[in-house]
Amino acid sequence: MEASKKADGHTLWTLFKTCFVISACTFGGGMVIISMLQKKFVEELKWIGQEEVMDLVAIAQSCPGVMAVNTSIIIGYRIAGVVGALITVAGTILPPMVILTIVSACYVQFRQNRIIALLLKGMQAGVAAVMINVTITMAKSVIKDKKLLSILMLAAASVAVLVFDADIILVILVCGIISGVLS
């Protein structure tokens, strides 16, 4: 995976600003942030392709650590090399660090505040919708390739996770091994 763009000031600022804003304004975990990164870097900026972003997400998900941070590091590296990776990780971790520091200092007040509790409850519906959108987008991409093995693995992995509550990491590793052996 080679960095494709020069690490000019505009590119680095766009990387930082995008990751910062997405991280600061997105609730619901890694998949939600990843969908926003995908929309920005694939659809708006067209810096990376849809299939490539799926590969990057798969790599990020199979690595230890927070998936949103892993993905931003890989995207940053892909776009602007090591400096891009450092810029995107800073943009991604800064907002949660500040927010969690404030929340931790005021934990009891946050926990007992009815308005905050209602806001967080209401956000769950939006988070679920974004996660469904990510799932549909990624599934469409797998189906669009019309490769029987990929479609069968998508179906089997979905059943394994949804019906049998299989470990997600194990499912990803098995799919990777099957694809590597049979492709």
Image: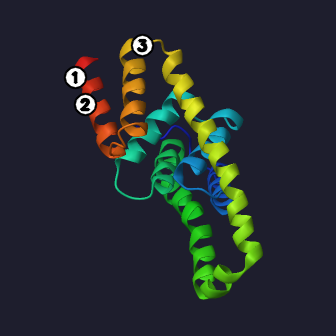
**Depth check, front residue: 158 or 145:** 158
State left or right for residue 114 relative to residue 3.
Answer: right
Q: Find disc 1 in the rendering and name its residue.
A: 181
Q: Residues within 10 Å of mark 2 (few under 14, many from 20)?
A: few
In three-dimensional space, the C-alpha distance between marks 2 and 1, rounded to whole angstroms, equals 6 Å
In three-dimensional space, the C-alpha distance between marks 2 and 3, rounded to whole angstroms, equals 16 Å
State left or right for residue 179 relative to residue 17.
Answer: left
What is the three-letter code of the residue carrying label 1?
Answer: Val
Residue 49 visible? The answer is: no
Q: Find disc 3 in the rendering and name its residue.
A: 147
* Residue drawn at the location 49% of the way across and 56% of the way down: 69
Q: Residues within 10 Å of mark 1 (few under 14, many from 20)?
A: few
In three-dimensional space, the C-alpha distance between marks 3 and 1, rounded to whole angstroms, equals 15 Å
* Residue drawn at the location 34% of the way across and 38% of the way down: 172
Question: Residue 181: which quarter of the image?
Answer: top left
* Quadrant the N terminus occupies: top left
What is the three-letter code of the residue carrying label 3?
Answer: Lys
Q: Earlier in the sequence, mark 3 or mark 1?
A: 3
State left or right for residue 165 relative to residue 101.
Answer: left
